[in-house]
């Protein structure tokens, strides 16, 4: 029989999170972020966190909410351009920031979950990202050594999930969620729709439940749009 | 002289049928508007889509469907979604034929800087370092000078680098230039622009052939 990962709510899901822990949070911009878990982290008031997330939210949503409360000590991200409070804390030295190339971030999470301690990539060679890292040439091209990332807790957000923790993401809300699910010692999945076993097509699962330790049905999703861009009905292709 | 749409329109002419293309934020995003009807091209956005379509109609936008600039988009028939590791496998593995991106500075040796101004602005490199380190064909789309009127085409970049010796071609509001042998080589002039004007706006070494044609727009 399948192993149930269901917890009753976000409070139960976040049991055991302590000050100083390293957390991974899925999402790209505000797309596919674990909204309910972030709200709970604010409520819990845990601090001195190291957060690994591609972006840092905006001033009043996403990880910006944790930044406002000064709960984050260090961020590991690839792009933080949308958040004024983040930039202020970084430039003033209150917040430690490790900016790394987006593909390296994704692969470092994947490697962490897949038992690969390090890998060579061409990304960042010759830049400040390469400082202090081993350089080796393969096929005549220099590469730098990047190490795997893991986390005490990983928070992911899926479209649908079943009680065994199998997850399906929607459109580009998938982004970093599958790799971070793999790299968390405890992975917490919040889903828009929690379904019984046997409903999801096994051919269509994006993240197998083996990577998920706790799953709950989220609620009141805001799903904010960062750059709402539309075309007019008359225009053909702009 | 070209405006941003003009730069995008000229770069669109570099794209060939059968190519997968990654467009960066800003002027590069506009390139998609100038692809001829019927040309078989798919746009990749590194947040996890191949087959990116135009912006949605008002009321049809979906918070779960965005591009790497976080703009709402649509998916073309035949589109596919994937995670960020798979996306950068496509990029590092050189399955994408062309990358178009913006820059703050480009050097005559093909270095590019576009992610950080020390002490002032730190947005992060996003996917740019992975893209420029791996792509075989990189076109930089940018204005020839910055807001202060200073050249963005330099002997060496002054800002922190995004990538080393990777840019092959630059398309600006003034001209198209190829980068090789430590110099910018003038290929085409924008309408109404002279080679002397390009030389005056280019701080890095510029090679001007005897005859430089004007850009043609079809």
Image (cartoon, grey):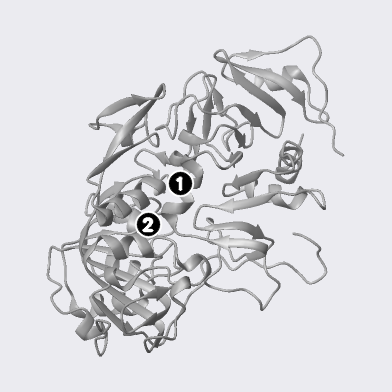
- For image coordinates 18% across by 75% down, the residue present is A45
- For image coordinates 82% across by 52% down, the residue present is B38
Residue A91, image x and y in percent?
Answer: 30, 48
**Foreground pick, B10 / B53:** B53
Are the two marked residues, 2 and 1, in contact with CB atoms closer than 8 angstroms?
Answer: no
Residue B21, image x and y in percent?
Answer: 62, 45
Q: Quadrant of the C terminus of chain B?
A: top right
- For image coordinates 61% across by 39% down, the residue present is B97
Which residue in the structure is indicated by mark 1?
Answer: B89
The total number of labels drawn is 2
- For image coordinates 71% across by 34% down, the residue present is B173
Place residue B15 in its image quadrant. Answer: top right
Residue B71 makes an appearance in the image: yes
Q: Is residue B155 left or right of residue A123?
A: right
Residue lying farthest to the front in this orientation: A1
* Chain of residue at mark 2: A
Residue A95, image x and y in percent?
Answer: 23, 54
Which residue in the structure is indicated by mark 2?
Answer: A54
For label 1, the crowd category at 10 Å Cα-Cα, with few meaning under 14, some 14 to 19 and many 20 or more, is some
**Foreground pick, A117 / A135:** A117
For label 2, the crowd category at 10 Å Cα-Cα, with few meaning under 14, some 14 to 19 and many 20 or more, is many
Residue A145, placed above or below residue A78: above
């Amino acid at each position: 029989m399948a192993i149930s990962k269901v917890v009753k709510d976000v409070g139960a899901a976040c049991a055991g999170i302590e000050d100083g822990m390293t957390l991974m949070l899925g999402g790209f911009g505000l797309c596919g972020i674990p909204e309910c878990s972030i709200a709970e982290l604010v409520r819990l008031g845990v601090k001195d966190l190291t957060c690994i997330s591609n972006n840092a939210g905006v001033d009043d949503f996403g990880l910006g909410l944790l930044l406002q409360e000064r709960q984050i000590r260090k961020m590991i991200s690839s792009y933080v351009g949308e958040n004024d409070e983040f930039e202020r804390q970084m430039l003033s030295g209150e917040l430690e920031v490790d900016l790394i190339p987006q593909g390296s971030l994704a692969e470092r999470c994947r490697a962490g979950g897949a038992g690969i301690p390090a890998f060579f990539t061409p990304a960042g060679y010759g830049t400040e990202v390469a400082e202090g890292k081993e350089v080796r040439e393969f096929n005549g091209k220099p590469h730098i050594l990047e190490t795997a990332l893991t986390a005490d807790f990983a928070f992911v957000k899926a479209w649908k999930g079943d009680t065994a923790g199998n997850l399906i993401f929607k459109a580009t809300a998938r982004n970093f969620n599958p790799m971070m699910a793999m790299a968390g010692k405890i992975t917490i999945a919040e889903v828009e729709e929690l379904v019984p076993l046997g409903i999801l097509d096994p051919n269509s699962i994006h993240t197998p439940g083996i990577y998920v330790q706790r799953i709950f049905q989220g609620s009141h999703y805001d799903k904010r749009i960062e750059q709402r861009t539309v075309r007019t009905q008359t225009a053909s292709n702009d | 002289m070209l405006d941003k749409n003009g730069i995008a329109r000229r770069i669109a002419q570099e794209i060939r049928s059968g190519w997968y293309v990654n467009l960066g934020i800003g002027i590069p995003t506009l390139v998609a508007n100038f692809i001829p009807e019927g040309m078989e091209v798919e746009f990749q956005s590194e947040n996890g889509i191949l087959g990116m379509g135009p912006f949605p109609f008002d009321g049809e936008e979906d918070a779960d469907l965005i591009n790497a600039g976080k703009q709402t988009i649509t998916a073309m028939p035949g589109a596919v979604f994937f995670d960020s590791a798979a996306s950068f496998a496509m990029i590092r593995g050189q399955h994408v034929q062309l990358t178009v991106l913006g820059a703050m500075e480009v050097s005559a040796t093909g270095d590019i800087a576009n992610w950080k101004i020390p002490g002032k602005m730190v947005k992060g490199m996003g996917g740019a370092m992975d893209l420029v380190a791996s792509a075989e064909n990189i076109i930089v789309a940018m204005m020839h000078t910055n807001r202060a009127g200073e050249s963005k085409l330099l002997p060496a970049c002054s800002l922190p680098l995004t990538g080393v010796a990777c840019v092959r071609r630059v398309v600006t509001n003034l001209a198209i230039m190829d980068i090789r042998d430590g110099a910018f080589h003038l290929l085409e002039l924008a309408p109404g622009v002279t080679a002397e004007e390009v030389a005056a706006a280019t701080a890095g070494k510029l090679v001007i052939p005897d005859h430089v044609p004007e850009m043609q727009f079809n």
